[in-house]
Structure formats: C-alpha cells, structure tokens
Amino acid sequence: MSEPARSHELVVLKPDLGLCRFGPDALMPSWVGQGGFWSVSRTSDELSIVCEADHIPSGVQAEKGFSCLKVVGPLDLASVGVLAELTTALAVAGISLFAVSTFDTDYLLVRKRDLPDAIDALREGGHSVHF
C-alpha cells in the first residue's frame, strides 16, 4: 500500500546559483564559502561546488543561471519520497533539476529560465511555492 502524496512548502531563494566542476584531486578553491548558499561534494570522480554565481571566477568550468527552491523544513530523516514527490512534478513538466540535500532539508536547482514553469508544475502537483 503506497503512502498518499503529501503537500510541501517551498521558498524561492534570491541569489542566482552556479554549478562548478573540478577534477577529483583539486584543492578546495579559496573563494568557496563566500555568500549565503554553497555546497561541496567530493567523489573519486570529481569535486562539485554549488555557490552563488557572482562568486565564481572566470575560467572555472561552471554552469550558471540556476534558481533555487528550498523545501521548508526541517524534514524528518525518516521521511520517504519527499524528493520523489517534488521531482515527479518537475519531470512531468519536462524540467530538469539538480538536487542538493542537507541534514534538515532539500534544495531543487532549476534553470532560471525554467523557474516560472517549475513553480507552476509544483503548484499543480499540490505544493505551495512562495518568494
């Protein structure tokens, strides 16, 4: 028996974000940590950094122009399907995303040009979105 879909509240964060990629052995750049939103992930394949686009120096391999939707939390770590419920609404609308999760909540990054459609899709999926 599947659990009924839940409604989630999301907030659009103000700064435009960028996604940066470095090689697996790259040192952490000194400019990381500036601004109010940043996230770092390292694997054996790469070092990925999400941060405010204005802080990314020229010459860095990056994709800029992302808007961020924060799921209002904190979410219980035992919650099942939160990302699935949100990403399904976006997938049905043909909107790609980059997800970042923290201990307390999830963040959905969508291309800035797709933000209006993403908001519409999430609202049609029963979720509330505000600025």
Image: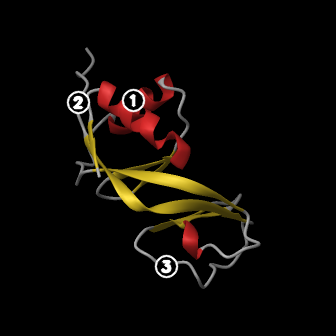
Return the mark for residue 33. Answer: 3
**Disc 1 vs disc 3: Cβ atoms closer than 8 Å?**
no
Of residues 72 and 74, the one drawn nearer to the viewer in this rendering: 72
Between discs 2 and 1, the one toward the N terminus: 2
Of residues 85 and 77, the one drawn nearer to the viewer in this rendering: 85
Q: Secondary structure at mark 3?
A: loop
Return the mark for residue 6. Answer: 2
The percent coordinates of residue 50 (x first, y second) are 54, 63
Residue type at mark 1?
A: Ala
- Residue 125, placed above or below residue 105: above
The percent coordinates of residue 131 (x first, y second) are 29, 52
The residue mark sitting in front, 1 or 3, is: 1
Q: Which residue is mark 1?
A: 121
Between discs 2 and 3, the one toward the N terminus: 2
Residue type at mark 3?
A: Gly
- Residue 95, placed above or below residue 38: above
At 47% from the left and 53% from the top, the residue drawn is: 67
Q: CA distance from mark 2 to mark 3?
A: 34 Å
Q: Quadrant of the N terminus?
A: top left
Q: How is the image coloured?
A: secondary structure
- Residue 98, placed above or below residue 93: below
Q: Secondary structure at mark 1?
A: helix
Q: Secondary structure at mark 2?
A: loop
Q: CA distance from mark 2 to mark 1?
A: 15 Å
Of residues 80 and 7, the one drawn nearer to the viewer in this rendering: 7
At 23% from the left and 52% from the top, the residue drawn is: 73
Disc 3 crowd, CA 10 A, few/some/many (<14, 14-19, 20+): some
Q: CA distance from mark 1 to mark 3?
A: 32 Å
Return the mark for residue 91. Answer: none
The percent coordinates of residue 65 (x first, y second) are 58, 55
Q: Is residue 50 left or right of residue 8?
A: right
